[in-house]
Image: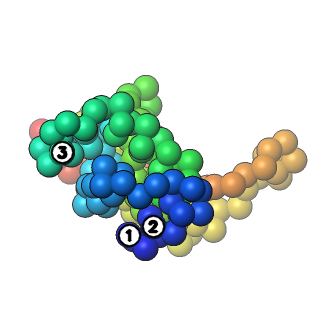
Amino acid sequence: MMDIFYKRSKEHGLKITPQRTAIYQELLKAKDHPSADIIYKRIAKKIPNISFDTVNRTLLTFSKIGITSIVEGYGQPKRYDPDMNTHHHFRCIQCNSIIDFHNKHYDDIAVPEEINKQFTVINKKVVLEGLCNMCRRR
């Protein structure tokens, strides 16, 4: 994944700084689809003088160059996902956790013709909503 980070950064004329590298590495470690604030809090422990604005702008830049995506926030802060492979999400409506899952049938869902006539679809993603196991047991 770091190879992709270096390649895409070079392709887009983005300098590879220690801050950007640390932010991307932290994002890769995360499995919880963190917000910019969560990444900032994690990074600030390692780089105390980094600003929230730097983290936020860097994450937005990463999404523009295609090394992370912004996942469904539903009125909450943007959350980021470094997994650029085809996958889908389950979102808990109680605790707002977002869990990745893979399903070939969902990957192959056909886009309705009326949508294809009106829009250019560049990505398909299924989002299921409900209660995660932790919230369901409560």
Whole-percent x, y for residue 3 in the image: 43, 73
Residue at the image position 30 percent from the left and 32 percent from the top? 52
Residue at the image position 30 percent from the left and 55 percent from the top? 18
| Image depth: mark 2 or mark 1 in front | 2
Residue 56 visible here = yes
Q: Which residue is mark 3?
A: 47
In this rendering, would 92 be left or right of 104? Answer: left
| Image depth: mark 1 or mark 3 in front | 3
Compare residues 80 and 104 and report the one nearer the observer: 80
Above or below 99: residue 58:
above
Whole-percent x, y for residue 129 in the image: 40, 43
Q: Amino acid at mark 2?
A: Tyr
**SS class of the residue under badge 1?**
helix
Q: Quadrant of the N terminus?
A: bottom left
**SS class of the residue under badge 2?**
helix
Which label belongs to residue 2? 1
Which residue is most to the top?
75
Above or below 14: residue 105:
below
Compare residues 67 and 74 and report the one nearer the observer: 67
